Image (cartoon, rainbow, N blue to C red):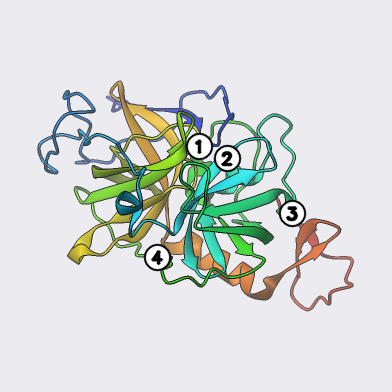
Amino acid sequence: MPSRNPFRLLSMLALGAGLALAPGALAPRAGAQEAGSQDAGSQDVGAGEGAAAGPLRELDTADDTRGWEAVGRIDLGGRGFCTGSLIAPDLVLTAAHCLYDKTSGARFEAAQLKFLAGWRQGRAAAYRDVRRAIGHPDYVFTGSGAIDKVGHDLALLELAQPIRLPSITPYETDPHVAIGDRVAVVSYALDRAEAPSLQDRCRVLDRQDAVLITSCSVDFGSSGSPIFSLRDGVARIVSVVSAKAEMEGRPVALGTDLDAPLSTLKAELAGTLYPVSGMVFRRGAGEGAASGGAKFLRP
């Protein structure tokens, strides 16, 4: 008898996305933990005790935001926003679907994007324009709700100028996270656009096909938010929020596994891509920059 699929993909999470998505095909792995019956706002629980997550806490003072200043809001040409985080002085990690206008499906030009590091109550710790925006080469924006998109829903923004301030330290990344591990999310969202919020009592529920499934609470605007491990008192990014879903009728957040996708993106940024008239092409083997054999990448 086939196992029942408890997952239903609800929506990608760039502000204003509002996509009508059909149920996804994310199947439970044998032995994987499923969400329990506790309320989402209940106390922290261990890996074997259920999947409830702690409450969101708004970071609305300078003391609250200390250590989280490298998380910022990405403004999308006046059409909405996503969340992103610095992983180098000039690199912001976010979700690939944030690079697209959710109404028209058109890709934003890099010049339309702004990164506001540590944005809080109308002010940012640093403001930066974006020089280049590169999505994962296997990500294709179609507006559909295919679950396999989540595994490639990753992008890098190269800033026009690096951020080198003592108060803003880029985060390390660490793809090594296990089912049951405690994680945290720092995010902006539809009803909390003016200050980030922290949820530091989530759990990893499962990992499947380059998708991390967590008990964290996310909403529109949370796309690209860093999911942190909190080992040894150090916050390291283990995933990036892509979508929200339901598991056994309870909300869960889906993130992109960083292991292979981030390495691919960094290689792309290092020089395997070149821009032509606002589009991005890949050089084929043995081709020069003027070759007619270049093919369009739709990240």
Mark found first going from the N terminus, 2 or 1: 2
Q: Which mark is residue 81?
A: 2
Q: Is residue 85 positioned above or below 58 on the image?
A: below
Residue drawn where x is 24% and y is 34% of the image: 55
Label 3: few (<14), some or many (≥20) within 10 Å?
some
Against 274, residue 258 (above or below) is above
Q: Earlier in the sequence, mark 4 or mark 2?
A: 2
Q: Earlier in the sequence, mark 3 or mark 1?
A: 3
Q: Earlier in the sequence, mark 3 or mark 4?
A: 3
Q: Tell me which residue sits at (89%, 66%) in the image.
A: 292
Tell me the residue that label 1 is attached to. Answer: 221
Where in the figure is residue 198, as x and y percent of width and height? 32, 44
Q: Badges 2 and 1: C-beta atoms under 8 Å apart?
A: yes
Examine the rendering and report whether any part of residue 220 can be seen.
yes
Left or right: 80 in relation to 257: right
Mark number, residue 111: 3
**Number of residues whose C-alpha sits closer than 10 Å to that of mark 2, classed few (under 14), some (14–19) or many (20 or more):** many
Q: Are marks 4 and 2 in contact (CB under 8 Å)?
A: no
Distance between mark 3 and mark 1 Cα atoms: 20 Å
Mark 4 or mark 1, which has the lower sequence index? 4
Look at label 1 and name its amino acid. Answer: Gly
Residue 107, percent from left and from top = 72, 44
Picture disc at residue 191: none
Q: From mark 4 to mark 1, how far is it between C-alphas? A: 20 Å
Q: CA distance from mark 4 to mark 2?
A: 21 Å
For the question of whether residue 299 can be seen, the reply is no
Marks 3 and 4 sit apart, C-alpha to C-alpha, by 25 Å
- Looking at the image, is mark 3 or mark 2 earlier in the sequence? 2
Q: Which residue is mark 4?
A: 171
Q: What's under tag 4, amino acid-wise? A: Tyr
